[in-house]
Amino acid sequence: MSSAEPWQTAEVSGPKKSAVITKPAMVRAVINRARHPVLLIGNRAASLDIVEKKFVDYLIDLALVHKIPVIATGHVNKALRDRGYTSAIIMPAVEAGQRIADPLWHGLHGRGPCDLAIIAGMPYPMEWTLLSGLKHAAPHTKTISLDNTYQPNATWSFGNLSIKDWQEHLTAITVETAPEGPADV
Amino acid sequence: MLRLTEKKIALTIKELDSGFGRIRDLSVSIGKLSTGEWTEPEGPTPFPTLATLRAWDRKLLSRYQPFYMPFCDLCCMCTFGKCDLTGTKKGACGITMPAQQARTVLLTACVGAATHTSHARELVTYAIKRAGRDCIIEPGGNAIGVEAPVIRLVCGEKPQTLADLETILDYCESQITSLLAATHTGQEGDSLDFESKVLHAGMIDQVGMEVADLAQISALGYPKADPDAPLAALGMGTVETSKPVILVIGHNVPPSVAIIDYLARENITDHVEVTGICCTSIDASRYSPRAKIIGPMSWQLRYIRSGIPDVIVVDEQCVRTDAFSEASAAGTPFIATSDKNCMGLPDRTDDPADAIVMDLADGRQKGVLILDPEKAGEVAVRVARAVMPARRKSQASANPESIREKAAECTQCNLCQRACPNDLAIPHAMKSAGDGDLSLLSSLYDTCIGCGRCEHACTKEIPVHSLIISAAADKIKNEKYVIRSGRGAIQDIEIRNVGGPIVLGEIPGVVAFVGCSNFANGGKEIAEMAVEFAKRRYIVVTSGCAAMSIGMYRDDEGKNPYERFPGSFTAGGLVNVGSCVANAHIAGATIKIASIFARRNLRGNYAEIADYVHNRVGAVGVAWGAMSQKAAAISSGFWRLGIPVVVGPHGTKYRRMLLGRADRDADWYVCDQRTGEEVYAGPAPEHLFVAAETKEEAMVLIAKLCMRPNDTSRGRAMKLSNYIDLYQRNNGVMPDDIPRYIRTMTDIPVTLKGDISRILSQSDWKERPIPDPTLFRHNKPVSTEEH
């Protein structure tokens, strides 16, 4: 399987497909360039195992290291709180998508519309459709999918990764390389 | 008096002296009865056409704006294309992506509405043949005065006999044709105008469904609005395999009725099992509680492959298109009965039953098409009895060793998992099964939707789905449940009893669990939600496949929801109205609240009543496993009434949501009819169509979406109490939007007084009046409202 094939075989999109993230440093660079990034954490993040931690643990690290505000979808907020992360905004994923797509949205903290949405941990087809909505309706917003299954509608997506490679990529983004400067959130 | 409306003529002569004689009290109707005795004044919009209710639709769509999530970047609908519509690109015809998505949603809704309306046409024709044109429409005897709330509201007609329903269907068919025409390349290009037509399709769908169910209730003697409709058996484990077994699949009940009638005529009812999948089984159980329901659509493959059915009869809708080839593989004789679903089979309609029975029983023909329900019924019974003894001798189930051997062939290529809609970890379960542990394979059964895509993806031709159901054989044997037969409409007295508490908010809401079984995490979730809301004293209503999934559940004490909760339309009730077409009774109940409780005129008065329902009746639809175009049409009908619908994660594939923006205060003003002033009423309800990612998120949304501007303080406090409790339970914190829902301090639930007062004091909350709400500006008639 190519790393740029949609994980669900039939979920092909069209001419505009996401670029595969081959170097985690690229994600860091994109985050650093963003003025108003947001991290959407879906419910599956709480149950997906990545070696000795859950996916949600890496995502919390990402939010803290890069100071990215979090939208908790599904009911993942409980898992966030269990880990001491208490500042997430709770919102259904499609509602978050609609607001991100609005170029006049005041943003999570009133500082302007979102220009980077990092999405992870949702059911594959739901994340697929949500990213499609943003691809078409939010030209002002870049998107990144951090699941280990290729999402063709993101601007950038991890490819179809083994757990080991996924862990290495996430670790590289969240721990081993510090951001060069905080994003304006 | 001579009345001319639409295609109909009614001539009444009180007294006439003429050269050829004297005539008194002559009444002649052509095409439609005279509704002269119905004194209710006619409203502004009887028989609305495509743009009649556009102003109302625009009101809803300005508040609940579409958020499109295209399923494909392209339009492939004409030879100009394919056209890439990515982002702001336009197609060769000039269409944009939002318009194309809305157009696709309209097509989907049209398919659904056409399906129900076609079904209704067939049922009305069948019912007239069976009971006569003058058969009185009687959904509930003396218990029901408003016999057809949707038809009254939309068409401005009061149907009395089966023949009257034909005219109503003429209208539906003309509207669906026009709606479909609107999707042709090169005309409508505005997404909101497409969306308005989606709502129109949904409203027409409600009419078609009401016609269908009124016809079958009236002609077939189904339970008539009976809260104590009998319990029917549900589940594969209930089938007595010592008897010949007939399986009916689909939605259109006449062949099932013919089977049951033939068994009764031959006095062999006790000797043959009539079992069914999908809504035709629900309707068969309304006709005879002895008919058994196997389960929703997702049970088709597993039941056909079990070899238990001795003959399979299919009608229309939600029948697997490979049902015949699956039946052939299982060696099961097959009868198709609908001209919409011929399945490539030879038409034996005009042949003698004896000859068809012989050919099917001997295996000379594996399947036949019989477009005569009575003949199909007779053939089905006779074939089942003829083939059953030999079939029972030849059946052998897979043993653990054979499952292990097959599973060991798995190469772990992951293609099965990548084909699975629910991303089930099939390769992992296969590896484990290959090593001799079948438990993981068995556990997949709980969340498998039975599509079979895993098998078609497998390069080693492993019968993946069959292995899953073989590994789960013990679970299947124990599928022994009950379901309350579909009761049909809601009684007027029930509406009188609950109308006030619902409108005032003191019954926290009406939650309708409807739709298909495309569940992301198994049917258990919809049952758990239904039980949760029934326990919280909401009125829980259900229909179709959702009603079956609710029945396939036992709580910690081993109780089935239908045994635990009453079937009456009351707080804490669990009301199964019936099959898909019975969904019209759910919409009908909300409309009847406006009519019976609030004494609003229904007749051709759609926008006013929808405004009433939207602002006052705390109803929410939940289509947790919605899959079909029919489910899309049903949802669209609820939207036009201003009733929100929640879908599961797969529901995002319907391509768009209708979402409110709670953060924009200006969107949530209503007119207070007492003062004529515009009043902030809060985002109630916040969305019209929203997908939830998890069951827990859905429950929070349901509780929140039950709030309405009209709630009294007592009612709002009760609704808030449920919302906050569910929110805290599932998210671990208090919701951050509480100030938006508190109008006065008396709205605050007593037990949360301290916490909420603190929240309010830390916000810019100000007390505001509780309005007598309407979306229409004071004293301004609907037809003159600007868009």
Image: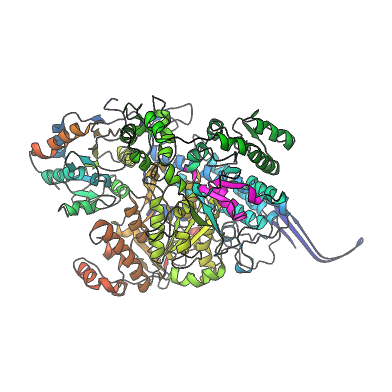
Residue B710 coordinates in the image, percent (x, y)? 40, 68
Q: How far across and how far down the image is residue B304, in percent?
A: 52, 38
Query: How has the structure been colored for display?
Result: rainbow
Task: Give the quarter of the image for residue A48.
Answer: top left
Residue B94 visible? The answer is no
User: Eyeballing the image, is B441 above or below B713?
Assistant: above
Q: Does the magenta stretch include residue B286?
A: yes
Q: Is residue B325 visible?
A: yes
Span colored in magenta:
B269-298
Residue A140 sits above or below residue B637 on the image: above
In this view, the residue in front, B22 or B473, is B473
Viewer-nearest residue: B29 or B332 = B332
| Relative image position of residue B320 (x, y in whole percent) | 52, 37
Number of marks present in the image shown: 0
Q: Is residue B586 magenta?
A: no
Left or right: where B444 falls relative to B738: right
Query: B610 or B486: nearer the eye?
Result: B486
In front of the other: B312 or B54 = B312
Q: In this view, does B347 lie above or below B233?
A: above
Pick the quarter of the image with the N terminus of chain B. Answer: bottom right
Q: Is residue B540 above or below residue A26?
A: below
Residue B244 image offset from top left, x and y in percent: 61, 43
